[in-house]
Amino acid sequence: MTGRILSGKTLLVTGAAKRLGRAIALAAAENGADVAITFRESEREARALTEELARLGVEALAIRCDVTDEQSVREMVKEVGSGFGGIDVLVNNAANYETADFEKITVAQWDAIFASNTRGPFLVSREALPYLKKRRGHIINMGSLGGLRPWATHAHYCSSKSAVHMLTKVMAKALAPEIAVNAVAPGMIDLGEKSAAAFMKKMSKQTPMRRNGTASDIAAAVMFFASAPHFITGQILAVDGGLGL
Ligand SMILES: NC(=O)c1ccc[n+]([C@@H]2O[C@H](COP(=O)([O-])OP(=O)(O)OC[C@H]3O[C@@H](n4cnc5c(N)ncnc54)[C@H](OP(=O)(O)O)[C@@H]3O)[C@@H](O)[C@H]2O)c1
């Protein structure tokens, strides 16, 4: 992506100390946005990332937040709003992923996945609304191919992401015309984990594009929605190399 398409904008990404959130934060800074990231346990990585973001010539903030905790979300959004004077783009990225046989999923596991993956994006969006409305902003939810296709050993995760897709559509309608709301649904993304190498190889062969996705594929899709016309709203964009077809 070239040019500084987000120059003068502020972007908030939850759970962005590492992996996809980190790539999204860096892409936004490269595009000129001031970036606030949140972290829960990865403080060291979050601090290092803010230094990296600042070196790109933008303002950067890192704030601890548990997206399952209403008070924590409220305080974090307030801190970003006052630190940056507003929020133009919210990326609901923080989530949890877990593999479990259907009959072994406990109520606690089910509720924990929904609390972070579904209630989290709802809570952060609700609290950020006044700022986003003022700026006629964008919300981008991170969905999943697992919210579009059933994965047998991920009933709670798939259901939580499917709910995020519906939440995206409901919010797009409820928050129009001030705020555009869309979702990016990543497919198989290779983040270089050695333990996943054999599985990744197998998946790349099953993918029409003959490779797995990269963090920059996902960041590019998020940058598209972050800078897209408001007329594009309520969309779920699978970024999966055709795997879901
Ligand atoms: N990676 C993939 O292949 C893939 C595929 C499909 C969809 N996605 C979606 O894309 C997004 C990013 O994926 P990812 O793999 O980079 O995510 P991830 O590493 O699983 O999680 C991102 C961050 O979420 C934070 N988090 C978890 N629970 C939290 C809570 N209760 N409060 C606040 N933060 C919390 C963690 O922060 P701390 O480390 O600071 O605790 C974690 O670093 C997620 O929504 C994911 O579901 C990813």
Image (cartoon, helix red, strand yellow):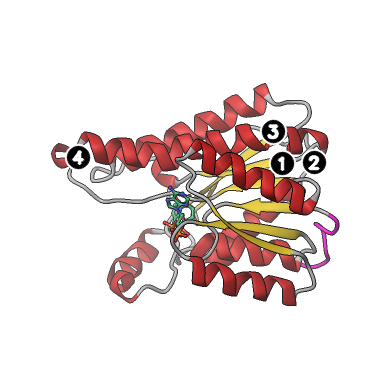
Label ID, residue 105: 4
How many neighbours does mark 1 have within 10 angstroms: few (below 14), some (14-19), or many (20 or more)? Answer: many
Counting residues from the start of the chain, the first of labels 3 and 2 encountered is 3
Alpha-carbon span between mark 4 and mark 1: 35 Å
Image coords of residue 233 (percent x, y): 69, 34
Disc 4 + disc 3, Cβ < 8 Å:
no
Hey, what amino acid is under mark 3? Leu
In the rendered image, which residue does mark 3 sit on? 129
Counting residues from the start of the chain, the first of labels 3 and 1 encountered is 3
Counting residues from the start of the chain, the first of labels 1 and 2 encountered is 1
Hey, what amino acid is under mark 4? Ile
Counting residues from the start of the chain, the first of labels 4 and 1 encountered is 4
Of residues 128 and 121, the one drawn nearer to the viewer in this rendering: 128
Counting residues from the start of the chain, the first of labels 4 and 3 encountered is 4
How many neighbours does mark 3 have within 10 angstroms: few (below 14), some (14-19), or many (20 or more)? Answer: many
Q: In this view, does 3 lie to the left or right of 212?
A: right
Hey, what amino acid is under mark 1? His
How many neighbours does mark 4 have within 10 angstroms: few (below 14), some (14-19), or many (20 or more)? Answer: some
In the rendered image, which residue does mark 1 sit on? 138
In the rendered image, which residue does mark 2 sit on? 229
Q: In this view, does 84 lie to the left or right of 36?
A: right
Residue drawn 29% across the image and 66% down it? 199
Q: Give the range drawn in magenta.
A: 2-8
- Secondary structure at badge 2 equals loop
Give above or below for 192 relative to 8.
below
Image coords of residue 124 (percent x, y): 58, 39
